Image (tube, grey):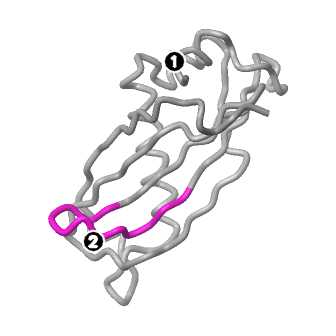
Amino acid sequence: MEDKNYFRKKIHEIKTRVRYQETDQMGIVYYGNFFVYFEMGRTEYLRDLGLPYSELEKEHIYFPVAEARCRYRSPAHYDDVLVIQTWVSELKHATVEFSHNVLREGDSTLIAEGSSKLACLNEKRKPAPMPEKLRKLFQ
């Protein structure tokens, strides 16, 4: 197991505006949508490293989500602008964990925090060691 504190904490940020269809009957962002926000953050984090998912898949490297969690801190509403922060929090032999914060732009209220752990799979969709080039980018 590798030390979680080993990483230079590169926090990647994106912004998104809450759309009406993302809210529930109470006018609050539906809880399941935070996992979509987390995926948006991961996808753009990888793109910023020069590794969009499409390129990884061309190399037969796949990253399904093996575990995800979210803790809700404050409600978000229609038309709020959310800042999604994403960073690598753990890197193991065949998994990578991303941590996420979702903040409301303007007052910086913490809306939600969570993580998503992805497994590395090879062309046969079997667990595989993290390719060295990815390991170096994540560290």
- Number of residue marks: 2
Three-letter amino acid code of the residue under disc 1 = Leu
Q: Residues within 10 Å of mark 2 (few under 14, many from 20)?
A: few
* Residue situated furthest left in the rendering: 106
Q: Position of residue 60 (x, y in %)?
A: 67, 15
Q: Is residue 133 magenta?
A: no
Rendered view: 136 above or below 39: above
Which quadrant of the figure has residue 69? bottom right
Q: Position of residue 34 (x, y in %)?
A: 46, 62
- Label drawn at residue 137: 1
SS category of the residue bearing label 2: helix
Q: Position of residue 111 (x, y in %)?
A: 38, 70
- In the rendered structure, the answer to whether residue 63 lies left or right of residue 86 reads right
* Residue situated furthest bottom in the rendering: 26
Q: Position of residue 32 (x, y in %)?
A: 52, 67
The label nearer to you, 2 versus 1, is 1
Q: Quadrant of the N terminus?
A: top right
**Residue situated in front as seen by the camera: 27 or 93:** 93
The magenta segment is: 103-114
Please give the residue where the numbered disc 2 appears in the rendered image: 20
Mark 2 and mark 1 lie on one chain; the one further toward the N terminus is 2
Three-letter amino acid code of the residue under disc 2 = Tyr
